[in-house]
């Protein structure tokens, strides 16, 4: 595999990271029965406060500490602020029983307004600058694995943390008392209530915890990706995170895989702008990656549901083989130069996603009680 | 069987505008099945929710094993050995039986991580299996609840209570959703439980059931205890009178029917099910004007699909349906309504009403676009209201106002809204499925009278019910469905419970007779 592809996949992981954090926020909320349309706003606040925290800490302390400390301070402030915004969503939708979609929308508008205003009146005039980003931390040994080492194990710390979080939450939601209770609250709150589980408390905890994760996603944009705050820098990622959550069927691992697909699309868009990739080649690569992805997801799915159908095994394995072969073959072929509009190429993964969504995922059913405030009887 | 395990002293509970429980005294003896009988709204569920800690009483106290018990929430109740099976299942459909049972009291294995420990599904699943064996409650612990039948789900609910270590079981209307067979099985289970030292409060509004299974009966009416008695001391009519507060006709006076020409004719109708296997298989029958044709059968033998095919909710693959000679096979519901069909569906909340709409809007769901409710452009609210007021009076629908959402009415009154809507049009054929499921004696009496009236006005009535008594007391002719086929058709005068029961179980009468001989 060549440098371009490895770089592309590695970038895909980076682009997927904020989406995964956002989706995990959505999963925690909806698994307990609270819709969170406000992920976008929570991420934006997280990004803004992470920037303010790190930049001001850096400015005030001068060069007394390592920039990493400023970044960590920023991270903590970003996460806490987003959790606070989530607490607002929780109070509005759980305590005051305001329509959850409206409450989330309010948060999005509020976040956009506040951060925009603050950037205009403070950041821009004061020329406040960031303190850089977390460095890459290649993991010893693992980063030496050919191809995969470069893609997965030569990343920045918040990417690793995301890996860990996905694995932990996948385990916790489905295999611990905590997860069982959260899911029961999202599916059938009165059943949970009758066995002594506090429905509203569970929901508060999940929404606020989710907000903290969305804050991580926002902070990531500032602290590991861009290095400074830009107005509306989340650019709809909070909403894509919702799509990722649904595509991943409300499971952390599913969301991770879905985010990879979206992250790949974004990475490709970025990469194509350099103008050094043959467009036809890019087209073939996209299709090959999607085929590979569909096969991999199918394989993981049948492993998760412990299906022993040999037919689906054969189908999934041949999809993976086909995708991999196409990737290799595409390297060997000399494609004629032909300009396809970059926008179209950028769109293609989304179109294929929609097709995959309708064809493969079948019914995506969320937790049964989402959107409804809990009333005793 | 003489020591009281539970005593309620002067329990009183107000809801805004209602006195749900008025100074109720009640006691449950050890190893006793004590039935609490009362109409819908009598306050049975409220009283039990108080015992189970879901509501706080305004006054009164609860004694468990002669000790005053302070029950603040369900956890307190469970600690005191009280478990409750709710009227509406409290099971999470997407989870397994095991997960549902461990919920709230999870067992973990491996590292002691508390709430983040690893669920020990295997261990609990084994415990459930042996618990089930001990009490004769067969369920697969690894099955997902949504795949279970209603009867199985009920067993899971009982197991859940037993698993939590309850000695006092409260069963709130457990039979409302069960078929007669399942009800019989439940009674067996209840007797077995009592035999093993448990005590049961059994809530119902069905008179037959209390007589079949209860040791003592306490009757509740409008939040008050009317009296406590034993099954031997009273007959059905007396019990009904205690419950309703007046004499009730338990059997309908069906009078003489005068059937005329055929209105509905169904010929060789076949309807596919989920897996394309026919669930209604080559069914033919006819219903004449002025007669009630009853279809008996155990739930799930194709009755639902047959009705759906006749009423335009499901497509048939072969055969045809005619109303007054006109072929209406696979037409949509609106065209069928024009052809004179009225349909009272099985699931009144899902298919019969728009729950969020007002009572008056629900009363014109089929006619809102016609004169006088609309001129084609606008709906005339005053006409809608006039219509609603008229029907509310005529059909004795108890509602504080016609503009409140129909969801806030009781089940019996919701059913009356549907029946009022359907019977207030000019109709030729009434298809009525499970007309009285879950309703109280008063409403049942009323609805049965209306069905007979419709028949006497020359409407052809197709009645589908899993309550054999209902079929027997109303029908002029009876068809029995088994496994998607119409296996028998008997005039009501010749129909006997036992014969119908054999057909419903898929046995031929001759065969069973032979068996008896050999
Ligand atoms: N949570 C509640 N809020 C207000 N009124 C209620 C509530 N629960 C029950 N009621 C009223 O209390 C009365 C008794 O209801 P319930 O105990 O459910 O009766 P039953 O179980 O005997 O059918 C009814 O009039 C009902 O409308
Ligand atoms: Mg009740």
Image (cartoon, coloured by chain):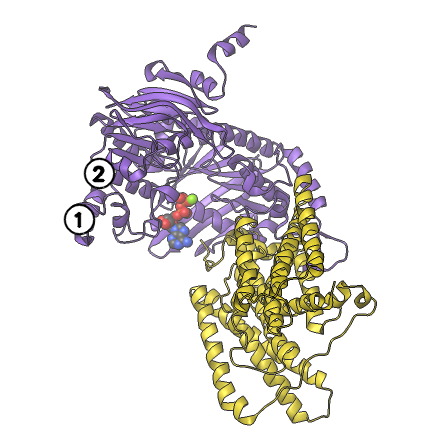
Q: In the rendered image of this protein, does residue A206 appear above or below residue B499?
A: below
On residue B424, the disc is: 2
> Are circles 2 and 1 on residues that touch, CB within 8 Å?
no
Say left or right for A75 vs B284. Answer: right
Q: Position of residue B332 (x, y in %)?
A: 32, 38
The residue drawn where x is 57% and y is 49% is A360
Q: Nearer the viewer, residue B141 or B189?
A: B141
Q: Can residue B406 be seen at all in this image of the molecule?
A: yes
Q: Colour of chain B?
A: purple
The residue drawn where x is 36% and y is 52% is B19
Provide the letter of the chain coloured yellow.
Answer: A
Residue sitting at the far right: A141
Say left or right for A69 vs B422. Answer: right
Q: Position of residue B416 (x, y in %)?
A: 29, 40
Q: CB at mark 2 closer than 8 A to ligand 1? A: no
Quadrant that contains the N terminus of chain A: bottom right
Q: Nearer the viewer, residue A332 or B57?
A: A332
Q: In the rendered image of this protein, does residue B157 appear above or below residue B115?
A: above
**Residue at the disc numbered 1:** B386
What SS does tag 1 mark?
helix
Q: In the rendered image of this protein, does residue B305 appear above or below residue B382?
A: above
Q: Can residue B4 be seen at all in this image of the molecule?
A: no
Q: In the rendered image of this protein, does residue B308 appear above or below residue A361?
A: above
**Labels 2 and 1 share a subunit:** yes
Say left or right for B167 vs B387. Answer: right
Q: Position of residue B333 (x, y in %)?
A: 31, 38
């Amino acid at each position: 595999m060549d440098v371009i592809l490895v770089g592309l996949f590695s970038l895909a992981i980076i682009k997927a990271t904020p989406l995964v954090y956002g989706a995990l926020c959505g999963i925690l909320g909806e698994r307990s029965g609270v819709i969170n349309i406000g992920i976008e706003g929570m991420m934006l606040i997280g990004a803004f406060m992470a920037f303010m925290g790190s930049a001001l800490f850096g400015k005030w302390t001068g060069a007394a500490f390592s920039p990493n400390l400023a970044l960590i301070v920023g991270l903590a402030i970003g996460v806490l602020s987003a959790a606070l915004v989530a607490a607002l969503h929780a109070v509005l939708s759980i305590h005051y029983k305001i329509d959850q979609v409206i409450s989330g929308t309010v948060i999005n508008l509020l976040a956009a307004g506040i951060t925009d205003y603050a950037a205009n009146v403070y950041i821009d005039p004061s020329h406040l600058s960031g303190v850089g980003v977390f460095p890459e931390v290649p993991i010893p040994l693992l980063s030496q694995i050919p191809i995969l080492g470069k893609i997965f194990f030569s990343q920045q710390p918040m990417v690793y943390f995301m890996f860990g979080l996905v694995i932990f939450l996948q385990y916790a939601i489905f295999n611990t008392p905590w997860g069982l209770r959260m899911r029961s609250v999202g599916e059938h709150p009165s059943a949970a209530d009758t066995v002594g589980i506090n429905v509203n408390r569970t929901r508060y905890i999940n929404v606020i915890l989710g907000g903290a994760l969305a804050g991580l996603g926002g902070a990531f944009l500032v602290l590991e990706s861009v290095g400074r705050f830009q107005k509306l820098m989340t650019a709809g990622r909070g909403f894509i995170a919702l799509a990722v959550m649904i595509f991943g069927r409300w499971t952390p691992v599913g969301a991770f895989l879905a985010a990879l697909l979206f992250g790949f699309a974004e990475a490709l868009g970025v990469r194509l702008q350099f103008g050094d990739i043959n467009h036809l080649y890019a087209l073939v690569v996209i299709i090959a990656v999607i085929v590979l992805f569909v096969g991999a997801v199918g394989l993981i799915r049948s492993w998760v549901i412990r299906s022993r159908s040999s037919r689906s095994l054969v189908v999934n394995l041949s999809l993976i083989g086909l995708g991999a072969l196409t990737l290799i073959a595409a390297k060997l072929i000399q494609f004629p130069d032909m300009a396809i509009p970059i926008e179209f190429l950028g769109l293609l993964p989304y179109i294929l996603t929609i097709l995959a969504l309708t064809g493969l995922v079948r019914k995506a059913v969320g937790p049964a009680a989402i959107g409804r405030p809990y009333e005793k009887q | 069987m003489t020591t009281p395990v539970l005593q309620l002293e002067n329990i009183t509970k107000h809801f805004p505008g209602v006195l749900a429980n008025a100074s109720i005294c009640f006691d449950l003896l050890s190893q006793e099945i004590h039935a609490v009988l009362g109409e819908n709204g009598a306050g049975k569920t409220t009283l039990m929710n108080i015992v189970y800690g879901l509501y706080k009483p305004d006054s009164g106290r609860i004694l468990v094993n002669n000790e005053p018990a302070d029950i603040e929430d369900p956890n307190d109740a469970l600690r005191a050995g009280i478990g409750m099976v709710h009227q509406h299942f409290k099971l999470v459909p997407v989870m397994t039986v095991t997960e549902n049972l461990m919920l709230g009291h999870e067992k973990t294995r491996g590292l002691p991580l508390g709430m983040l420990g690893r669920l020990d599904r295997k261990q609990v699943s084994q415990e459930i299996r042996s618990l089930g064996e001990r009490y004769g409650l067969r369920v697969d612990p690894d099955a997902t609840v949504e795949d279970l039948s209603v009867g199985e789900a009920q067993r899971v609910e009982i197991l859940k209570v037993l698993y939590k270590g309850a000695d006092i079981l409260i069963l709130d209307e457990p039979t409302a959703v069960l078929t007669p067979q399942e009800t019989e099985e439940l009674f067996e289970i209840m007797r077995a439980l009592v035999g093993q030292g448990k005590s049961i409060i059994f809530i119902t509004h069905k008179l037959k059931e209390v007589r079949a299974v209860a040791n003592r009966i306490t009757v509740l009416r409008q939040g008050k205890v009317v009296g406590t008695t034993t099954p031997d001391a009273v007959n059905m009519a007396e019990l009904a009178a205690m419950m309703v507060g007046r004499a009730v006709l338990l059997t309908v006076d069906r009078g003489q029917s005068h059937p005329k020409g055929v209105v509905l004719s169904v010929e060789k109708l076949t309807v596919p099910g989920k897996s394309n296997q026919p669930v209604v298989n080559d069914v033919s029958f006819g219903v004449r004007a002025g007669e009630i044709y009853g279809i008996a059968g155990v739930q799930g033998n194709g009755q639902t699909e047959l009705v759906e095919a006749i009423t335009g909710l499901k497509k048939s693959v072969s055969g045809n349906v005619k109303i007054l000679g006109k072929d209406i096979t696979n037409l949509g519901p609106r065209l069928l309504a024009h052809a004179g069909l009225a349909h009272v569906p099985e699931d009144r909340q899902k298919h019969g009403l728009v729950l969020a709409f007002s009572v008056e809007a629900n009363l014109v769901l089929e006619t809102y676009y016609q004169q006088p409710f609309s001129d084609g452009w606008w709906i005339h609210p005053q006409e809608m209201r006039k219509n609603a007021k008229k029907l509310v009076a005529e059909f004795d629908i108890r509602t504080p106002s016609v503009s409140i959402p129909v969801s806030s009415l009781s089940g019996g009154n919701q059913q009356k809204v549907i029946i009022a809507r359907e019977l207030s049009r000019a109709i030729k054929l009434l298809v009525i499925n499970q007309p009285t499921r879950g309703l109280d004696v008063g409403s049942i009496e009323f609805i049965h009278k209306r069905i007979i009236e419709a028949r006497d006005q020359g409407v052809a009535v197709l009645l589908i019910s899993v309550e054999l008594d209902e079929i027997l007391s109303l029908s002029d002719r009876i068809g029995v469905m088994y496994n998607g086929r119409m296996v028998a058709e008997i005039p009501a005068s010749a129909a006997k419970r036992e014969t119908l029961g054999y057909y419903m179980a898929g046995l031929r009468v001759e065969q069973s007779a032979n068996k008896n001989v050999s």
